[in-house]
Amino acid sequence: MQWLEQPSLGAWRTIHCPYSTGLTASRFEIDMPLRSIVFWYNAPTIHQFGLIRALAEDPASRVTMAAFHNLLPDRREMGWSEPDFGRATRTIVRTDAERDRLIAAHAEPDALHVFSGIRGFAGVYGAFRRAALTRARLGVMAIRPDARRGSGLPRYLAHALQAIRFRRRIDIVFASGRIGVDWYQRVGFHASRVFEFGNFGDMPDASPSGNEPGGPYRLLYVGALVERKGVDVLLRALATVPSSSWQLEVMGDGPSKEALIELAGRLGIQRSIQWTGFQERARVYDALARADTALLPSRHDGWGSVINEALMSGTRVVCSDACGAAVLVEASGHGQIVPAGRADALRDAIRASIERGRQSAEDRAAIRRWAARVTPQRGAEYFRSIVLHVARQAARPVPPWRAEG
């Protein structure tokens, strides 16, 4: 499968694109070049702003990021600041009239509206329904829902009904990771419209340096302290690894923090753990660059951007198979993937990492070279290639992390 050479969104002209909706055949005619892209979010995206900024560098199409709220307080508490969208227009939609005017300005087949999910947020859903009444093309950024335990069947049925209702109108599903692709195909979206996608972030500026031999092996967890993230599984895994051989920094906060500290005490590993809370992004990247292995043991994680950040910092990763970004670990070979919720499997992966030894400057440089595949520029090229494929039935592109070379 060949990569398409940096296509320009404004360059294409396509006619008569047949596709299957999964139940009946449909036909979508396009006789204009794509001139605008509108991304719809509940609040300014902290995970896709690099992609939006890179897409906006193409002068052939206008790019807009529309949101219904400013950056949310919980994101600021996690160390995030207002994203830089570059040349893209950033607008906060405060009324239905403002929403409708924006949609009306991008209502023809030369426009693509991309929504953060469908029914997850009232504002985004309202915009989706209004845009669906126009001739514009529609895409959805979609993560696999948390369908654990008793919520599995109800969530499946809800998403299957969504697919039946909307799949003939949705042109592209940008699904997070392989787990996202599997889910949205399973609930009824046609495989020809579902593409493996992910988050794309900027490469840190710091030059990689190796960790000195000797001393404890540095493990790092970055993220919220909530049940879904599986930090309790991590602590139980570490309880059977000699504590003199490792040191864990937990960089995050949340409602489970006190219970996790208590659990670490009961397991006898509290002295080997630092609880440092949420930090500014510069401090996060500094910690990632010093860690030997970054950990993401989530029970469910739509993507898991810390995996991008770790690889871009030159650091190996151990994550669960419930993370969308596990595809990066699989494709790069720079880490291990374990079954979600399995403390024994996580223990074995951590032991193997420690036995492999601390990371050298050469190791880090090799990981960073591979991670250049998931920069915003590569994400924008892939995004353009997907839209071009859907519009023209050209060669289906492969995700940049799966591309050869």
Image (cartoon, rainbow, N blue to C red):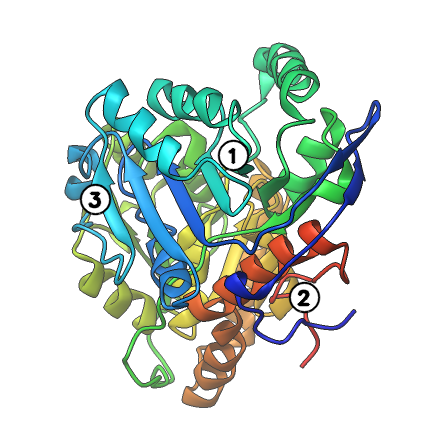
Residue depicted at x 36% and y 53%? 63
Image quarter where the C terminus lies is bottom right
N-term mark: 3 or 2: 3
> Is 337 rendered above or below residue 145?
below
- Of residue 292 and residue 77, the one placed in the foreground of this image is 77
Query: Which residue is disc 1 drawn over?
Result: 300
From the viewer's perspective, is 384 left or right of 259? Answer: right
Query: Which residue is disc 2 drawn over?
Result: 402
| CB atoms of marks 3 and 2 within 8 Å | no
Q: Could you tell me residue 19's position as x and y percent? A: 79, 39
Q: Could you tell me residue 40's position as x and y percent? A: 38, 36
N-term mark: 3 or 1: 3
* Count of numbered tags: 3
> Is 289 rendered above or below residue 210?
above
- Of residue 182 and residue 300, the one placed in the foreground of this image is 182
Q: How crowded is mark 1: few (under 14 residues within 10 Å), some or many (20 or more)?
A: many
| CB atoms of marks 3 and 1 within 8 Å | no
Q: What residue type is labelled 3?
A: Met
Query: Which residue is disc 3 drawn over?
Result: 78
Image quarter where the N terminus lies is bottom right
* Gap between marks 2 and 1 measured at Cα: 23 Å
Q: Nearer the viewer, mark 3 or mark 2?
A: 2
